[in-house]
Amino acid sequence: MNLPEEIRIQAENINFYYGEKQTLKNVSMAIFKNRVTAIIGPSGCGKSTFIRLLNRMNDLIPNTRVKGRIILDGQNIYDPDVDVVTLRRKVGMVFQKPNPFPKSIRDNLGYGLKINDIRDVNLIEDTIRHSLEEAALWEEVKDRLHESALRLSGGQQQRLCIARCLAVQPEVILFDEPCASLDPISTKRIEELIEQLKEHYTIVIVTHNMQQAARVSDYTAFMYLGELIEFGPTEKIFTIPEDKRTEEYISGKFG
């Protein structure tokens, strides 16, 4: 008997506006704990806008507004009393292009700990090592921690950014096209890492690569023109989708 999945985040009737332009329309979706949820769809359909709502990154864009609710731990994250810094620590994000700080590898990881008032040197060192191990990078950089992170390869830089996210101990990780600028070998490493990380984290990934979505995700959401067209177990979405638009997009007829 299969136990019901535990919902980690619940989006309810989300509408989002850039100025007067509406880019998301009544999007409702459950994101399940310790599962990978992929969001697919053509460019401009609202994928990245939606994922950035989950830790309020869109707050940084002027003249935007959101309607609806996103529930995390029983609270709407858009309630006025929500501490956004605490939210972003709990819901971390890895972006499309690797964006390491122009600092040493060690300082890239230590920075987030220090701004969260962690001063214990031993704890910082243990966290740095553990985060690099989780990101499958420790063995490659353990003798180079004082070198600039900018000297790492693109794939290594992206894994460093993942380690930097992990260092502040999030519960949810958002990946926005994390392999878009990487070569196939680095992409494979990131995909394998995502598979390992879901044991301890809830993961949402935006991807243009449908093969990637099929490989790494447990659930898939297909978005089109700001609407959620279909959501369900990945195997079902890719083999017997219910909506004709989902089938046409997956089969390459548009997008």
Image: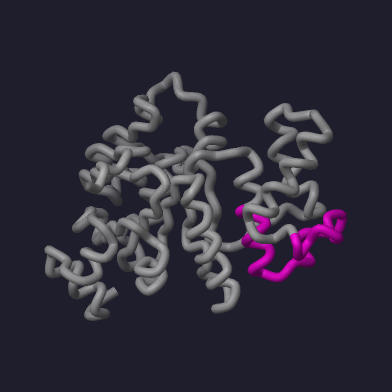
Please provide percent x and percent y for residue 26: 21, 44
Residue shown at 20% from the left, 57% from the top: 230
Part of the protein shown in magenta: 139-162
Residue shown at 64% from the left, 68% from the top: 155
For this orientation, the residue located farthest to the front is 1
Q: Nearer the viewer, residue 7 or 111?
A: 7
The image quarter in which residue 210 lies: bottom left
Q: Nearer the viewer, residue 26 or 218?
A: 218
The image quarter in which residue 136 lies: bottom right
- Give left or right: position of 56 versus 103: left
Please provide percent x and percent y for residue 146: 87, 54
**Does the image show residue 231?**
yes
For this orientation, the residue located farthest to the top is 81
The image quarter in which residue 85 lies: top right
Q: Is residue 18 above or below residue 8?
A: below
**Does the image show residue 208?**
no
- Give left or right: position of 12 versus 195: left
Residue shown at 24% from the left, 59% from the top: 225
Q: Is residue 211 above or below residue 150?
A: below
